[in-house]
Image (cartoon, rainbow, N blue to C red):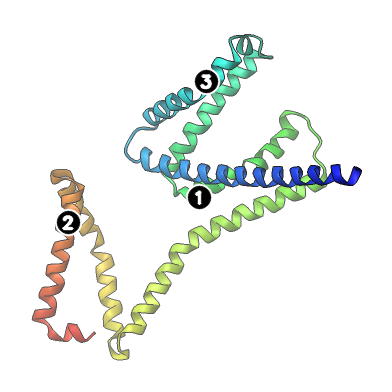
Amino acid sequence: MTTASATPMAATGRSAALAGIGFMLMAVFLFAFNSAVGKWLVAKYPVGEFMLIRSTFTLLFLSPFIWHAGRAAFVNAPRPGLQVLRVVLGSVEVAMFFWAVSYLPLADTTTFYLAGPIYVTALSVLLLRERVGWRRWSAVLIGFTGVVIVLILANSAGALTDLLGQSLMQLSVPAHLRGRAGGAWVVAIGLAPLGQLQIGALASLFGVSLALGASGLALVALATGAAMLFPRVRHL
């Protein structure tokens, strides 16, 4: 009888574990999706307006739970001053995160944000006078090392991409023309600010879509004209 009763309990435990894993994976996905959508929105709207819309929809979503909890859950909340302070700090924290996202790449910002437990552990010693053993400090050090590695890899991705592009360009042209190809690439990169000024002026006058379309058509026309006037270009 004990064995028979233990089997359903084990099955229930496995089901709960699988459900927990599923909910955690969904939470991670929603966090990433929320961050990506937030970065897209703060590029078009001010952070304050974005926070107002975000908080409004959050309040609407939580309204049934607030109604079910009743007024007493808020009136009888312990340490109301600290509760209000926590709400203010939480709001400032979210606003600062999306403010940072508007200036930094999303990967870098998320890496710094997810390093929060490292800072919490360090500040718990200073602010809460908690005792942190060497095991926790070792975990903090390992986590900080991981953050540094991720940031180095993220920042080196651009250099690796540039190196790969240069290598492919050098391999795709004959040996006696590699110097010319490299020189043409340097000239193109050097003239990039002029193109940015041109497309920026068109965008301010006629809109981004028209500016990108006109610039793309101009590049196609330029490449076609160069291929017709200089037949040797087609053999590069």
- The residue sitting at 58% across, 9% down in the picture is 71
Question: Could you say whether the residue bearing mark 2 is in a helix, strand or loop?
Answer: helix
Residue, disc 2: 213
Q: Is residue 186 left or right of residue 10?
A: left
Spatial CA distance of label 2 from label 3 is 48 Å
Q: Is residue 48 above or below residue 210?
A: above
Q: Earlier in the sequence, mark 3 or mark 1?
A: 3
**Do residues under tags 3 and 1 come within 8 Å of each other at their CB atoms?**
no
Residue, disc 1: 108
Give the amino acid type for the residue marked by disc 2 in the picture.
Gly
* Mark seen at residue 7: none
Of the pair 31 and 204, the residue shown nearer to us: 31
Q: Position of residue 179 (x, y in %)?
A: 30, 83
Q: Is residue 11 above or below residue 162?
A: above
Q: Nearer the viewer, mark 2 or mark 3?
A: 3
**Do residues under tags 1 and 2 come within 8 Å of each other at their CB atoms?**
no
* Quadrant that contains the C terminus: bottom left
- The residue sitting at 46% across, 68% down in the picture is 160
Question: Could you say whether the residue bearing mark 1 is in a helix, strand or loop?
Answer: helix
Q: Position of residue 193 (x, y in %)?
A: 25, 58
Give the amino acid type for the residue marked by disc 1 in the picture.
Asp
Neighbor class of circle 2 (other Cα within 10 Å; few <14, some 14-19, many 20+) is: few
Q: Earlier in the sequence, mark 2 or mark 3?
A: 3
- The residue sitting at 21% across, 59% down in the picture is 195
Question: Could you say whether the residue bearing mark 3 is in a helix, strand or loop?
Answer: helix
User: Is residue 115 visible in the rendered structure shown here?
Assistant: no
Residue, disc 3: 64
